Amino acid sequence: MTDSSNALEHYDVVIVGGGIAGLSVSYKLEDKSVLLLEKEELCGGRTLSMNMGSYVFNQGAQMIPGGETNVAKLADELGVTRTLINKTKTSTYMNGKFVTGSSELKFLLGLPIPFFEKIKMAFGIMRMRSRYRGMVDLSPRSDDPTLQDLSEMNLVERLGIRHPDVKAFWDSISKSSSTLRADEVAAFQPINTFLHHAADEFFIEGGTVQVAKALVDQTKARVETGASVTEVVSNDTGVSIQYEKNGESHTVQAGKCVMAVPAPLAQSVLRDLPDAKRAALSQCEYGAMSSAAFLVSKPSEHFFGKGNWRVPVVGMKTIGIGDPTFTFPDDMKQQDGRGLIRLYTGDDGSQMLQKMSDEEALDEFEKDLFQIFPSARGLVLDRALKHWPYAICPWRVGRLDYIDAIRAPHDNIHYCGDYTENSGLESAELSALRVVSEITIG
Ligand SMILES: Cc1cc2nc3c(=O)[nH]c(=O)nc-3n(C[C@H](O)[C@H](O)[C@H](O)COP(=O)(O)OP(=O)(O)OC[C@H]3O[C@@H](n4cnc5c(N)ncnc54)[C@H](O)[C@@H]3O)c2cc1C
């Protein structure tokens, strides 16, 4: 490997990581000289998407949250088209049964659990809505008493869940946002996710990666892809950043450095970390996820019925199954005649699948697909798979105690990314806004 560090380049800011968080910082720091370094050949991180048939398989994030969220405003500002996912059903696949209802109450009544448990669940959900509705997509604050309350124990303890099927239901909700079971994370995470599922969600035309592409097109920063950062060290004049690209080692100097990569990856390249910061970042272990898509020779609605976009799956390796064609026009879907079905796992399922070859892992997903939709047998035209070893940083009990230390900058190094908030695109965007104000206002 050669070292081309002789002519040292200097930037006001160097950003490590070209996911939504890092790209947003680069886009907003328009008055500074900025270099963004992204390890992969394509920016976007956990928003990558690929075309399948006439449709799009979002390998990572499949929707952006709507309403007044910062990420929705960003998409609009960038001129990226988003379409409301007009879901009209609440559904789940549980104990071999596809349960669906046009209202939450009808859905709950259809669940294959004892009547008494249904009533308990209905009251629990009503209480959740009235108490916690306001906290969806907010930046978690360490002095917020509601959040403190929800961060002290897990949901199973909090709701006194004893029935195994009710526990399995909440596990599936919890895994979809945290990758872990409901008894492994603070109550905050599954509650936030459940309320989130009922809120407005948007599909990005062309796939979620279009937001990242628009940011790359519209940022004034220099964006280097295929540039893997190997070392970040603070020094007297700012921060020195070393990276490898095409077998060559480069060093650049920055006034400030923004670490916009998952916490364990940040830790692996940062040298001389203060002990308090290392301890805080160590709280941010990630869970894995795997997603798969199957192009089939019948429209997706044939399997899902009308109004179902995302169906949590209880008690299986697959934790959710969804219809990526949901927002496409009906006449287009009828003319095309094909459908797309997306499945995904939480951490335990993904760990198991990552040990297999891609074909074997797809076979495992296919078994779940055929169990849920037996009529899909023989109709699969194409299939695709993506593993995410660093999918989501779960909100474990005790994390709130560290949230300020996780965010705190030191020695001209700033911390950005979804893990510095909760999880998801809005968290990534909130983190970018915070870092921009740290850099510009101080
Ligand atoms: C399967 C799945 C489904 C999801 N679904 C949703 C959803 O529907 N809605 C939602 O809001 N959120 C969803 N999320 C979460 C969402 O994708 C993330 O919260 C968000 O994309 C995180 O953005 P980020 O910029 O913080 O991190 P990332 O997207 O992880 O960006 C980090 C970047 O850093 C790069 N990098 C890493 N190491 C280095 C290095 N050494 N040098 C240079 N670059 C480096 C990576 O390649 C990556 O591009 C989902 C996530 C997954 C995995």
Image (spheres, rainbow, N blue to C red):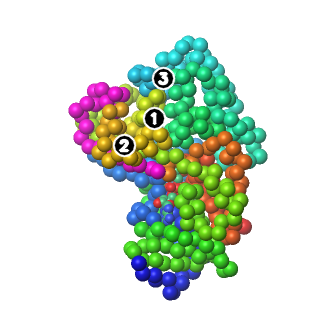
Q: Are marks 3 and 2 in contact (CB under 8 Å)?
A: no
Expressed as whole percent of the image width and height from the top left, the position of residue 176 reads 51, 38
Front one among 413 and 324:
413
Q: Is residue 232 above or below residue 129?
A: below
Q: Residue at x 69, y 44 (%)?
A: 398
Write down the quadrant of residue 291 in the picture: top left
Image x and y of residue 78, in percent: 50, 58
What's the amino acid at mark 1?
Ile
> Residue at label 3?
102
* Quadrant where the N terminus is found in the figure: bottom left
Determine crowd level at label 2: few under 14, some 14-19, many 20+ residues with C-alpha closer than 10 A: many
Residue 319: assigned label: 1
Mark 2 = which residue?
292
Q: Is mark 1 within 8 Å of ligand 1?
A: no
Residue 197: percent from left, percent from top = 53, 35
The one of 230 and 421 positioned closer to us in this rendering? 230
Could you say which is closer to the camera, residue 159 or residue 376? 159
Q: Could you tell me how far apart the alpha carbons at marks 3 and 1 are, in whole angstroms?
A: 21 Å
The stretch of residues the image draws in magenta is 369-389
| Label 1 residue SS | strand
Amino acid under label 3?
Ser
Residue type, label 2: Ala
- Point 46% across, 58% down: residue: 44
Q: Is residue 412 above or below residue 358?
A: below
The quarter in which the C terminus is drawn is bottom right
Name the residue rendered at 62%, 18% in the picture: 120
In this rendering, does residue 78 appear at all? Answer: no
If you read the primary sequence from the N terminus, does the residue marked by circle 3 or circle 2 appear first? 3
Helix, strand or loop under label 3: loop
Q: For the residues marked 3 and 2, what is the alpha-carbon distance in whole angstroms?
A: 27 Å
Q: Secondary structure at mark 2?
A: strand
